[in-house]
Amino acid sequence: MNADPMRDTRDLLIRAVLPEVPFSGWTMDALAQAARTAGLDASMAERAFPGGVTDAVLHFVDLADRRLAEDAEEDGLEGLRLTGRVRWLIRHRLEAWAEHREAVRRAAVILSLPTNAARAARATWATADLIWYLAGDESVDFSYYTKRVSLSAAYSATLLCWMSDESEGSAETWAFLDRRLADLSHLPKAIAGAKSKVGAVTRPLERMMSMAARRMSGRSFGVKRT
């Protein structure tokens, strides 16, 4: 269930503004014009995105994530192994907006501003988390976070490659993606190694803490038990 009563309106404005972004950029004026194009009052742009163009760009990211989830459900990922599913999801996440590549590029510029660093990082994490979820990943704890950090980096790098790729069918981008996913395929082994190293440090500390707790439990600290 959609808990955001404005989401459909925001989706409408984003879809309406995308063709205009290559000419006008991500601006409130462009969003106001998009509102008029969509048959809404121009003031709807400010009401829908009170945080300005950054709000609009982040909603664009959210819209793209939701579209990916819908397309993955419709097309299905059966028959693909985990890496193949991740590859399909990343590629589809980008190809779905190939018509608006310049708008994506300009959105990335806005999110790269230092003032937007934290919000951009959260948005990238959300996309990586969604991709792992749709791919069927069921990792928890250490693996859960490590996989999402690694995929966030791989996705971001692939996005940068795709935005400037002029090869036919973005062939260079997909070759680049394959190399990044090959690196990710070694992740389970790296995680296991990291876990063993962490365990080698934490196990002695746990034993020391346990011994200290037992010693402490035998002291009254001057308080008489009744």
Image (cartoon, rainbow, N blue to C red):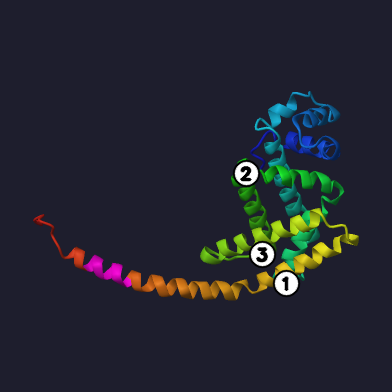
Kindly state the secondary structure of the residue where label 2 is placed. Answer: helix
**Residue at which label 1 appears:** 81
Q: Amino acid at mark 1?
A: Arg
**Residue 20, horizontal then vertical, whole percent:** 85, 36
The crowding category of the residue bearing disc 1, from other C-alpha atoms within 10 Å (few below 14, some 14 to 19, many at least 20), is few
Magenta residues, start to end: 207-214
Which residue does the image show at 80% across and 37% down from the upper left? Answer: 25
Q: Are marks 1 and 3 in contact (CB under 8 Å)?
A: no
The crowding category of the residue bearing disc 3, from other C-alpha atoms within 10 Å (few below 14, some 14 to 19, many at least 20), is some
Q: Nearer the viewer, mark 2 or mark 3?
A: 2
Q: Earlier in the sequence, mark 1 or mark 3?
A: 1
Q: Amino acid at mark 2?
A: Pro
Q: Earlier in the sequence, mark 2 or mark 3?
A: 2
Kindly state the secondary structure of the residue where label 1 is placed. Answer: loop
Which residue does the image show at 71% across and 27% down from the upper left? Answer: 46
Numbered badge on residue 101: none
- Of 114 and 87, nearer the camera is 114
On the rendered image, what quadrant is the N terminus found in?
A: top right
Kindly state the secondary structure of the residue where label 3 is placed. Answer: loop
Q: Amino acid at mark 3?
A: Gly
Numbered badge on residue 114: 2
Q: What is the C-alpha distance between the residues marked 1 and 3?
A: 10 Å
**Residue at which label 3 appears:** 136
